[in-house]
Image (cartoon, coloured by chain):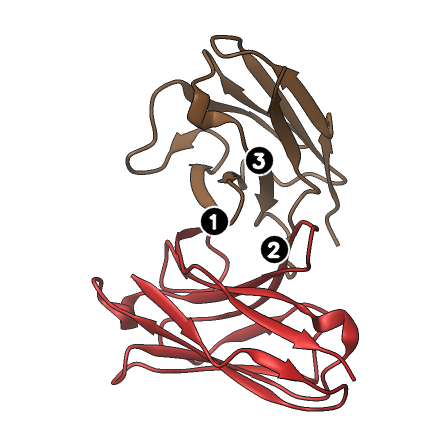
Chain colours: A brown, B red
Amino acid sequence: EVVLTQLPATLSLSPGDRATLSCRASQNINNFLAWYQQKPGQAPRLLIYDASNRATGIPARFSGSGSGTDFTLTITSLEPEDFAVYYCQQRGNWPPLSFGGGTKVEIK
Amino acid sequence: QLLESGGGLVQPGGSLRLSCAASGFLFGRYAMTWVRQAPGKGLEWVSVISGSGDSTDYADSVKGRFAISRDNSKNTVYLQMNSLRVEDTALYFCAKDRGYTSGWFSDLWGQGILVSVSS
């Protein structure tokens, strides 16, 4: 089973800051990684699929990169609505289509 | 849009059937997934079914107890949950996948339905 490790667990930043979130896979998953955003009381929302492709309607300030075992989600300039929990998920070696433990981006 | 129903409180060892009614897209062209989230915890992938319904997969934690199915004539996917355990307590999300076969990411999610397993 592929284990996804997300670091850091919490990121304390201010609006306008750049956010860099990491997701590391326990084995090679090529580029088969997605990023989701979840706000309190809401369903997850797909941001990035297959490592670097923005989903429909996702602003350009969100970008994804990486391949193999190391992946990054970057938010170039945090907007107030971006403070949320972010999860990565892999489909490179499944089942299961495992999720990472999440990174909470909070207001500093 | 995806709308889940069928959740509630059940005793350990009991059963529930969740339903997820879809609208606004060609339901039979997409695989469908169930994901759950225990209170205050992260996301856990539970099960997936292909667009035709011919292919299904499960997390080890639910294999042999849960069964996913779909009725494309009713635009609905189901999750039959048997032998429920306290650790199955969670918010269950239904999600549409990006592809027809299993193994795609989910690009449309329902709001979730709560399942509580307690004596």
Identify the image quadrant of residue B58.
bottom right
Considering the numbered disc 2 on the image, is that residue within a helix, a strand or a loop? Answer: loop
| Residue A20 sits in quarter | top right
| In-image side of A101 versus B47 (left or right) | right
- Identify residue for label 1: A42
Q: Residues within 10 Å of mark 2 (few under 14, many from 20)?
A: many
- Distance between the alpha carbons at the discs numbered 2 and 3: 16 Å
Between discs 2 and 3, the one toward the N terminus: 3
Circle 1 sits in a helix, a strand or a loop, which is it? Answer: loop
Q: Nearer the viewer, mark 1 or mark 3?
A: 1
Q: Which mark is nearer the camera, 2 or 1?
A: 1
- On residue A97, the disc is 2
Q: Chain of mark 2?
A: A
Residue drawn at x 36%, y 64% as measured from the top left: B100
Q: Earlier in the sequence, mark 1 or mark 3?
A: 1
**Quick one: label 1, few (<14), some, or many (20+) residues within 10 Å?**
few
Q: Which residue is mark 3?
A: A86
The answer to whether residue B23 is left or right of residue A7 is: left
Which amino acid, mark 1?
A: Gln
